[in-house]
Every structure is written in structure tokens, then in C-alpha cells.
Image (spheres, rainbow, N blue to C red):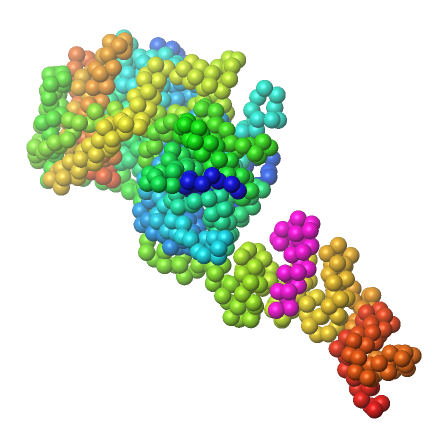
Amino acid sequence: MNLNNATITELHKLLTDKAISATELTQHFLSRIAESDSEINSFITITPEVAIAEAKAADLVLAKGQHTMLTGIPMAHKDIFCIEDIRTTAGSKILADFIAPYTSTCIEKLRHAGTVTLGKTNMDEFAMGSSNESSYFGPVHNPWDKTKVPGGSSGGSAASLAACLCVASTGTDTGGSIRQPASMCGLTGLKPTYGRISRWGMIAFASSLDQAGCFTRTAEDAAILLEHMAGHDSKDSTSLNLAVPEFTAALSEPLAGLKVGICSDYFKEGLEPEVENLVMDGIKELAKMGAEVVEIELPHTKFSLSAYYVIAPAECSANLSRYDGVRYGYRCKDPENLEDLYKRSRSEGFGSEVKKRIMVGAFALSAGYYDAYYRKAQQLRRLIKNDFVSAFEQVDVIVGPTAPGTAFPLGAKTNDPVSMYLQDIYTIAASLAGVPAISIPVGLSKGMPVGLQLIGNYLEEAKLLRVAHQFQQQTNWHQQQPQRNLL
Amino acid sequence: MNIPAGWQIDIGLEIHAQLNTKSKIFSGASTLFGSDPNSQASAVDLALPGVLPVVNEAVYAKAIRFGLGVSADISRVSAFDRKNYFYPDLPKGYQITQMDLPIVSGGHIDILLQDSTEKRIRITRAHLEEDAGKSLHEAFDRYTGIDLNRAGTPLLEIVSEPDIKSAFEAVAYARKIHQLVTYLNICDGDMSQGSLRFDANVSVRREDSATLGVRTETKNLNSFRFLERAIYYETVRQIDRLEAGRSVTQETRLYDHNKDETRPMRSKETATDYRYFPEPDLLPVIITDETIAKIKAEMPELPTQRQQRFIEDFNLAATDAALLANDRNLADYFEATIKNSQDPILSANWIKVELLGHLNRDAVSITDSPISAIQLGDLVALIQAGTISGKIAKDVFAALWTGETSSAATYIQQHGLQQLSDPSTLEPLIFDILKANPKQLEQLRSGKDKLMGFFVGQVMKQTQGKANPQEVNSIINRLLQEAV
């Protein structure tokens, strides 16, 4: 069996059958990273010693038969999750040498379940971007076409999985940062309900929107991961104090009777025709599987992008104030005084996209503008939420494209922020509302992957995963691989 | 204080009371004062990347208790906001506070004026927030040291309406708040550790003007005296400027107690726009009616109630009751004393005269008194039982104060200071003294009562002050009658 693109489920069987050891499996992926990541640049930090130690520990656990589904599974983590004793950069010069004295709850849980940490993946600086081009550590190349972007901000996590450098990876999604790169790299990318996974130890971009999630080859793998990542955390007041459902249990239920909503706003100008065709084909497939397709309205969804680009920058303008050169992180050389220390540490330490958003956010919150921008954006956010609440009284899931097009060439949009921001036009509404959403492969357009987005009601990740899983039982788009990995 | 005629002063106070919780408001770090710099700063207090605040729920009950103590409204829903500004002792670059929805709003407290009338000061609001760390400018050459031990200490900021019309009223109000928060056991009230700090908003206007003048805010006053001086200085400064035809600038000022003056804060330390917005890391604070009812039922006795109880239960004079009830620690001391002495009035006298006299003389606070309430109670009990005289008791008190002894009873035993009350011991002694002074005895017999003092004095001299004066009196009288 080809280990490169095996799923968690498949590898779990090999590990428990003793067909392979966790150490061998880990070595395999470490070698692959060493051989080919220089072309992709998906990792910021590779942690072979940690990985081997964890793999050896996993082998002991496997030998005793005390394993979980994740024991010995090599993973890559977005470099936004703090891991004790491993540097965490958030893709920024300002944290280029930062080593946290704690591990984020989400990664702690995955490690507790027996996963192996291969390293930390590249990302847009502080998760601000849709192409992974704002990283201080250089752009990530899309394994499907190295001249193209992998999407962002979790571009490194997506690319590392698409390049078969890990078995699954973690990401964070603030406005589409898991779903959009999943779409562009031909992966399953899950953003759970806001609050489902603890944010403790996850570097904040926009606190009310940030949500951890994962990249996997299948919906089934995503269900397995979510079971281990989710759960209440007393260290995060916004984490949901609810029992974690068995997401894997409901996967096999057929779709008969399921109501699938489509909204005309998701099929308007800006959507590449071939992407639209593939998405429509995907919806037909769902109908063929027994789902009833219903037209729904999300009247305020067209304001999502505007609301998002006020709220997210506003929150980031405060969240990033702590990077001031005083206690840790980048500090400018020979500051003349306090003012100089602040100004130069921050202007030298942050990249241009981050500075742009801090300024937009500070402006939106400033006296005299607060009502016109921040308050209005919050009002819109409530309306967008209400749209989803009413829609989910009629349908079980809402389906549409994840992104308006396929991966674009590196550098194509770096000087056109609006066009870059439009990458998230279909993903942002779910982020603002806090509902779960998943992107799954639905075909190739000119050889590049296209994603289908499924949005679910609050806490209904199980239903989303079931629809995605059933779809993946009938289609093989999720098994498509970039040419270079079929060797 | 000489405030020129024709001017009206308007003062509003913002009082920061450190809540006496064991751990900080948003982290589990200890709030203990005086530890090594930065030894009590957790990852949250240091604002490391990815950390999150979690509210220490003990602060809610303390804020609610305060609200009930000033007859205010307790918000069923309140919320935290971020106040953004850069300063090295503010690690996150924002302070978590409550802007739009404070936990306590409305309320009032009554202060006593110089003419013994009461005046009501309205309280606008009281909200929860975190304290900042400390910048240490002196200790490091060319650098500023940052100590984040205080960062995240819970504060209740109590904001008054501009109902205060003089420095005297401001101090009376501040003292009343101090008394209340210590009585409610929500703040230790230790001003030397910065547990209570005042910001004074002061403005002046012509007496016939209906609108408030331009105000200045003098920040971080940490004693009643500095509060009084700063307000006085600001008032005079503002009036002088206006009378000279100049204007008052709205600004933040600092009081320099060495020079006894206020001066503008450097503009870098003040932000013009704090860009408040709701804190997305914390959920709204929901307070239920049940919670409020429970806290109400457990409210500690307030000073006026306690004063009343001292009068009713212990027959104390109103002034004594007020003096003792005024300070919670003193009132607690008094009640602990009478547990042992069983004599409230005598105990009150001893606390009022001897104990407070010594405490004031040596500038020691009641909580640090070298004589414990138990020790004083034992001493008062010995006086009450007639074991020692009041005069001897003062010597015993002095021995307890200096630590020469830790027990009044033992000391009396060791030094043979028991009062002589036994007639069979006293009578022969007095008989001899009467006989030895025939002239004075004759005068006493002929009705010169002041000679009684002479004989009592003689007895005291002979017994080194140990004779029970009442007993001596009655024996002399009896002997006089028997001899007739």
C-alpha cells in the first residue's frame, strides 16, 4: 500500500496490525519532508527529534493495545498553535524566535491521543491572507502546480498534506483560512462551530472569528480528528461547554430525506464558470443520493465581506498590540526612547498586510468612526446570523462553492487587495455567524482542484461530516492527487 | 483653606479599590503584595501569544456587595470591553474593563459635613477592571524596569457624580468609601500598598454659572492627605487662571507631594482615544436574582448598623459607639476584647484611652497592635473583678505593650500586684495609720472630709498602691463610727 496518500483509517489498521510501526511511518514522512519540502516550503519548523520520540512512545502504546484511532499518526500543525519548547512564529518576523512555555489545548489533545508532531507549517502572517504570500518565511507553492498559490492563510498545512508530507494537518479558519486552501489543494477542510475547539494557545487574529480545524484526505478522517480536538476548556471562556458527540458514529447514515439549500448569492458574477459547473454537478450528485435541493435566501450574506473587513481588523488591531518589543519577540536595534522602541519594533517586525489591517482596525474603532464602522458591522453580523438561523429552519445544509476560482499564480493578486479579499467571499458568512462548514473536493478545473462548501447549523458538524462522507463514498474527487505524487 | 469668594467647585472622584481576592481577575496568579518583581506574573499577565483571560468569579460577589452597600442597581447583564493604549506596564496593549455595561450603576453614599449635617453623594457607576503593572523609573540607569506582579489585580472603579463641592467633602467621601469597602471585606484598604487610589476630576465655575467648568483629572492619589492637597492646589490654580483671564485646559495631571503641586502628565502617558470595543475573549456577565438575593442575605453589618448595635446591646455612649464602629478593624478588636472581659463599657474606655493613645503615639495600626484583643480583654476582666486597681492596670498595660510580658495575670502574680481588698489584711494596717496621725484623725472626725484623701493616700503609700481604694474608704468610715 502507498503510505503517501493513505488515510488515518487505513494507517490505523496498518499500525494495529503491526504491518508498520509508528516509528517507520514517521521516518517515512520525515524523509519525504526532507526530500521535497524545499520545493513546497510548507514547513517553517521541522521537528524530527520530537517526532521520533513521540513515534517511539506511540509504538509502546500500540504494543500495549491502549491506542486511540490517532496513535502513531504523523501530523503537521499550523505555526499558529503554541507548542511548548518548539518555536511558534505565526508566520511573522516579530515572533521569528518565540518559544512558548505552554502547548495549545487543541494540540495537547491531539498529542495526548498519540499523534506525532512532524513540525509547524507555513502560514500567512498572523493568518492574514488568502494565498500564503504574506508569510515572513516565504510563500508556499501549491503541490498541484508549483507556480500557483496553495490558498491561505493555512497554506502550509494544506500544501503539506497535498504533497503527502503528513497524514493530516491542523489549521485555523477566521474567514475561510481552512476551507479556501482545502479547496485549492484538493483536500477536505473542516471549520467547526465557533467555540467547538479551544482557542487557548492559538495565536489570536480576530478572537470572535478564529476557529481551529483540520485538513484531511476524507470526511471520515476529519470526524476522527474532531472527536479528539473538540471539547470544553476552562482556559477559554468562549469554548462551548457541551459534550463532544461521536462524529464518526453517524457517518454511514444515507442522505435520503436530507434537505440541501442553495442560495443564488453564491452563484453570482466573479464565480469562474467551470467552478460553477463542477459545483452544480456536485449538487446533482447529492440529489441523486436522495437529497432534496431547496432554494433558500440569505439576504444579508452580500454584506459579509464588508462586515468582516471591519470586525476582523478591529479585533486584530487590539490583539496584536502585545507585540511591542518590550517583553518578547522582535525588538528594534538601539531604540532611542519608548516611542522609538514601539514604532520601529512594530514597523520592522510586522509585514505590510498585518500593518494594513491594524491601521484599518484602529481607524474603524476610533472616536467618531466607531458607530459608522464597527457598530454597523456588528449589526450586520447579527443579521447575517439570523439569516442562517432562518435558513436552517428549512434545510439541513447549505451547499455552494468554497472559493470563486481555483488556485491562482503566485504574485497575481498581491497588489490587488480587493481581489485577494474576494477569495473569501463564500466562506466569510459562516465565520461571521459561527456556524460549521466544510470544503470537499468536487472536481478539477484545468487540472486544478475545486472545492464544494457545505455549511451546517450550529453544532451540527456530525450532519456536515455525514453528508461529506456519503458524497465521498459516491465520488472519487477526494482521491485525486497532484501528478508528482503518483510516482 | 482660602477659596476666593464667588467661585463654586465641582469635584467628581474615581476611586480604584483593589479587590482582595487571592488570585488575579483574569489569571490564576497570586495577588500577594511585595513579592520579587515579576514572580507573580503568569503567561496571561505577561500577555504571551495565544493566552486567554478567564474571569475569577470571586470578583462578581465583591462588586455586587459594594453595589448593595451603596443602594445601587446590579446589572443582570454586564460586559467587558477593551481599552486600548500602549504603555510598557500594560502588557496586552489594552486594559480589560467595563465601559458600556458596568456591573453596578446608580447608588449613593451619605457623608457627614463640618456642621454635622449629612450630604448625599451620588455614585454614577462601579465597574470591574484589571490593574496595570508598575514602571520602575529610578532603579535602572537609562532603563525603566517593569514589574508585572500587580498586572491583573482586580479593581473596582467607583465613579461619583460631580456632587462634591470641596476638598473636605472629597476626603469625607473617600473615607466613607474606604470604610465601606473594608467593612464589606472586598478591599483591604491598605493605602500604603495602593489598595485604594483616587483620581480627582476638578473644575471651577462662577457661582452664578449653571454649567460645569473645564475639568482636569489628577490621577493616582494614594492618601487622603494627597487627595486633599491636590484638590486644593488644583482649585486655586484654576481660579487663579480664570481670574487672570486665562482658560483651563482639559488634561490629565499628576500630584507631586514633594512640591505639593500638580502638573500635566506627559502627553505620551495619556491617550486621546482609547478605541473601546467589546472584549471578544469573554462572555457577557450574567447575574441572576438568586445570586443577588444570596449575597444580600450574607451582607456583613455596615458601620451605622454596628454603631447602633453597640449602643443598644452594650449601652455604649453614642460617641464611643461611633468611634469604635467607624473602623471595621477597631470594631472587630472591641468585640473580641469583650468576649474575654465581659465588660463592654470598661473595655471601650480602655481601648479609647490607653490602646488608641499608644497606637497613635507609636503610629501603629490596630491590626498590628502589640496587645491582642484577648490580652486586653483579660486585663479588663482583672480590673473588673477587683484583682488589680486601674492605676496598677496601667503599669500592666505598659508591660504588655512593650512585650515584657504576654499575660496580665502572670505579670500581676510575678510582681505581687494584686489589689488588697481583704478587710482582715487592711484593717490592722489602717488602724495603725489612724493611730499614728492623731491630729489629722481629729480633723477628719470634725468633718473635714478632705482628710479622707490624706488617709487613703497613706494606705496606698504603705501598700505600694495595691490597696483597693473603695475598701480602704469603707474600713476608715467603719473604724471612725466604731470609735464613736
Relative depth, front residue between B214 and A353: B214
- Residue A465, position as x, y percentages in the image: 23, 34
Q: Is residue A16 above or below residue B20?
A: above
The residue most toward the right is B436
Q: How many marks?
A: 0
**Residue at (23% x, 39% y) in the render:** A458
Q: Is residue A125 above or below residue B80?
A: above
Q: Does residue A188 appear to the left or right of B252 in the view shown?
A: left
Q: Is residue A59 above or below residue A155?
A: below
Relative depth, front residue between A278 and A176: A176
- Residue B144, position as x, y percentages in the image: 56, 24
Q: Is residue A354 visible?
A: yes
**Residue at (60% x, 26% y) in the render:** B138
Q: Quadrant of residue A68?
A: top left
Q: Is residue A330 visible?
A: no
The residue most toward the front is B5
**Residue at (21% x, 34% y) in the render:** A379
B121 falls in the magenta region: no
B352 falls in the magenta region: yes
Q: Does residue B143 appear to the left or right of B269 in the view shown?
A: right
Q: Quadrant of residue B283?
A: top left
Magenta part of the chain: B345-370
- Residue A430, position as x, y percentages in the image: 22, 31
- Residue A389, position as x, y percentages in the image: 17, 39
**Residue at (49% x, 59% y) in the render:** B303
- Judged by its main secondary structure, the magenta piece is helix
Q: Quadrant of residue B47?
A: top left
Relative depth, front residue between A58 and A161: A161
Relative depth, front residue between A372 and B153: A372
| Quarter of the figure with the C terminus of chain B | bottom right
